[in-house]
Amino acid sequence: MIQKDGELSGNTAENSSVKSIRIGIVAGELSGDLLAADLLKQLKIKGIAFVAEGIAGPEMQKQGCRSLFPMETLSVMGLGEILKQLPQILGLRRQLIQHFIVNSPDVFIGVDAPEFNLGVEKKLKQHGIKTIHYVSPSVWAWRRWRLKKIAKAVDLMLTLFPFEKRFYQENNIPVECVGHPFADSIALETDVLQARKHLGLPESASIIALLPGSRRNEIDYLGRLFLETTQRCYAENPALVFVAAMVNQERAAQFTALKLAIAPQLPITLIQGQSRQVMASADVILLASGTATLEAMLLKKPMVVAYRMSALSYWMAKCLINVDHIALPNLLANKTLVPEFIQENATPEKLAEALFYYLNNSTVVSTLQKEFLILHHQLHCHASEKAVDALLKLLSD
C-alpha cells in the first residue's frame, strides 16, 4: 500500500512525502494511452516510485505499466460495434475488477473509455479503493444523467477542457481541470521542414496527410472514403504528395488491403506510429473526428474532419447528442473553425473540395492558424504535472 513519511503539504508533488504508489490503470485507445503514459512519466520526474498494471497501450508499457489484457479489445466505437463484442468486454471487466479487489491498488485511474471504466471504478470504490477518472465523458453533449452514476463511481474527475468543469461542480463531484498534455508537449510553432526531413518527405511539395482513425471499425467506415477522396485530389493535381498515418501494423495492413482493392496505383506513403510528425509535415489534413483533431489544431494545421459509423449508431447519436459540432477545435471555440462532414454528407467530392479550398487560400489558412494559437494558449496548463498533484492530494486525504 501507499508509503508516507507524513501528510501531504499543499497541492504540489514537490511537497509530497509519498514514496511509492500501487496504481491500477486502464486506457481504452491510443489517445488514452498517451495521456496515461504522460502521467506515469510525470510521476517518475517527481521522484514518486510506482507499480502500475491494468490495460495499457505501448506508450504506457514503455513507462513500466504491465498490461493484463490487450488494449485493442476496448478500441471499439458505436453502439452496433460495441454490441458485437459486449460479452467479451463484460467478461474482461469482471476479471479486471476481481484482480484489483484481490490485488488492491492505492488508486485506480480510468483513462477515458467511460462505458468500460466507470463500471470498474464504481465496483472498486465500493471496496474502499480510491478512484480517479481522467478525461471527462461528454456529459455536456449527451446523457447528462450519467453525472449521478459518475458521482457514485469516482473520488475525483480530471477534465481536459475548462468548459467541462462546471458540470461536475454543479453536481458536487470533486473535479480538477488539468488542461491537455498535448498543449504542453506540442510547440507553439511547428517546424514543418524538420518533420519532412525526419520522414524523408519532399521539402517543397504540397502534402496532404490522411488520418482515417486508430480503430478497426474506423478504417472500415472511413478507409474507402479517404482513398476515393485521395483519388480525386490526385487526378486534379498529380504533383500532390499523400502520406497516411497508421497507428500500428494491423491498421496499416487493413488500409493497405483496401488500397490494393480500390486504387493500387495511387501513390500514398504509409507511416506507422508517427502520426504527430505526419501531421506536422502536412499542408492540410484529412482526418477522422477524435483526439487527432486536437493535435492538428495544436500543430496549427488546416483540417477537414469526417466521420462515418453504422446506421444504428448514427441514428442513436442523432437522437441523443445535443451539440452543434463534433470536432474539438469547433467545440473549444464554440463556433465553426473547420469543416465537418458526417455520415452521408461525407463524400469524396465534398472532402476533396474542402481540401483544395485550404490549399488554394493562404489567407484563410493564416487566419485559421491565429485562431488555433489562441486556443493553444488556453490549454497550455502543465497538465500531467497538475494531474499528478491532484492524484497525490487525493491519496493524502
Image (tube, rainbow, N blue to C red):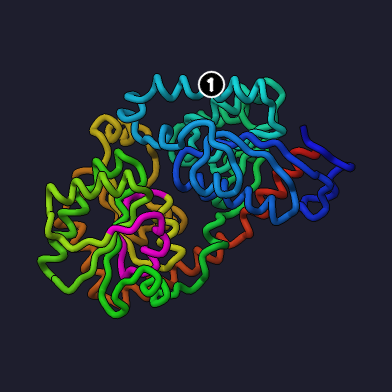
User: Please, is residue 163 above or below residue 395 in the view?
Assistant: below
Q: Is residue 66 left or right of residue 42?
A: left
* Residue 177 appears in the picture as rendered: no
- Residue drawn at point x = 58 percent, y = 54 percent: 179
The image quadrant of residue 200 is: bottom left
User: Please, is residue 368 above or below residue 262 in the view?
Assistant: below
Relative image position of residue 127 (x, y in whole percent) = 69, 20
Residue most extreme to the right: 6
The residue range painted magenta reads: 270-290
Relative image position of residue 236 (x, y in whole percent) = 11, 68
Question: Which residue position holds label 1?
Answer: 95
- Residue drawn at point x = 63 percent, y = 37 percent: 132
Q: Is residue 268 left or right of residue 87?
A: left
Relative image position of residue 83 (x, y in whole percent) = 34, 24
**Secondary element type, mark 1:** helix
How packed mark 1 is, by other alpha carbons closer than 10 Å (few <14, some 14-19, many 20 or more), is some
Relative image position of residue 253 (x, y in whole percent) = 27, 46
* Residue 246 appears in the picture as rendered: yes
The image quadrant of residue 129 is: top right
In which quadrant of the rendered image does the C terminus lie?
A: top right
Q: Nearer the viewer, residue 106 or 330?
A: 106
- Residue drawn at point x = 30 percent, y = 66 percent: 284
> Is residue 284 within the magenta segment?
yes
In which quadrant of the rendered image does the N terminus lie?
A: top right
- Residue drawn at point x = 58 percent, y = 42 percent: 134
User: Please, is residue 326 above or below residue 234 in the view?
Assistant: above
